[in-house]
Amino acid sequence: MTAATDRPQSAAKTESSDLILSALGMSMVFGGLVALNNVDLSIERDSITALIGPNGSGKTTFFNCVTGIYKPTRGDVILYPAIDLPSISLKGKPADVITHQGLARTFQNIRLFNNLTVLENVLIGRHTRMKAGLWGALTRNKKTRQEEAEAIEFSFELLVTYGLDSMANELAKNLPYGDQRRLEIVRALATEPKVLLLDEPAAGLNISETSALRDLISNIRENEKVSILLIEHDMSLVMTVSKKIYVFDYGRLIAQGPPDEIQRDPKVIKAYLGED
Ligand SMILES: Nc1ncnc2c1ncn2[C@@H]1O[C@H](COP(=O)(O)OP(=O)(O)OP(=O)(O)O)[C@@H](O)[C@H]1O
Ligand SMILES: [Mg+2]
């Protein structure tokens, strides 16, 4: 049992050893538009954290800044890889380096390789953890072939764990929509992330697919050593799976806390009702 779980849950202050990632003073300006305004957001180790807010409040921009797709105007992102390891600043690092450091994400609009198979899509995620360089890939030496075999085994095991193995050889485009969302998440897991960022995974799903997604997210939290940051508009999903919720409005952090507090926070209610 870790020191973190020994501490009372009601402890008012989260200590930095309980954190896996902190974004500090994150700002992003597009021309005259302040899409993110001095946001601080931390993710607790081994937990599910949600990020909610009305359309255009800066949620996806936040993901893009944290994962190196955008270079934020200001701010830093600190990764705490393990309790006994030094922290790492991800500031200014390119997206592939950030993936390698342990951040993986999915996109609001599914981004699969439609004409590759389900297994091949997961293998592409796995590739970030493979050592063979271009020379190895070209010569296909023994070491490379062994690494490839291991990658296939690892990827197939993930498909088994998350219920996609029967479709391993299907083209991604032929999967039902809910399974495409699931595949994107499994591909992200193939990078063995420390932090998994999911951008509206329930978008476009029907009620039963959303229920399956809820189980998937909970299973991932239990099976993998990963902390999850979830952007989602489906409030029933957010309120049931998250330990802590952050709320953005017009690029600002307007509230943070456990689901029961957030649900009745007047600032949050106003932000949503003011949308129409
Ligand atoms: N690359 C960009 N260039 C200019 N403006 C942008 C860019 N990306 C986002 N924006 C603007 O920044 C603001 C925040 O957008 P963002 O996509 O982060 O919102 P969101 O909270 O993810 O919304 P939604 O819930 O609709 O996905 C919006 O006004 C958007 O138009
Ligand atoms: Mg978005």
Image: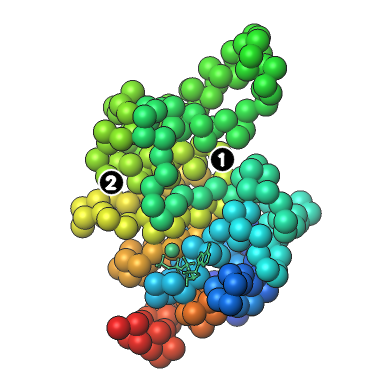
Question: Callout 2: 10 Å neighbours few (<14), some, many (20+)?
Answer: some
Which residue lies under the disc numbered 1? 192
Q: Nearer the viewer, residue 45 or 77?
A: 77
> How far from the left and from the top, in percent, is residue 38?
64, 77
Q: Amino acid at mark 1?
A: Glu
| Residue 75 circle label | none
Q: Position of residue 169 (x, y in %)?
A: 33, 23
Residue bearing mark 2: 178
- Quadrant including the C terminus: bottom left
Quadrant in which the N terminus appears = bottom right
For label 1, being within 8 Å of ligand 2 is answered no
Q: Are marks 1 and 2 in contact (CB under 8 Å)?
A: no
**Mark 2: amino acid:** Gly
Q: Residue at x 36, y 44 (%)?
A: 182
Q: Nearer the viewer, residue 224 or 185?
A: 185
Q: Where on the picture, by quarter, is residue 269?
A: bottom left
Q: Nearer the viewer, mark 1 or mark 2?
A: 2
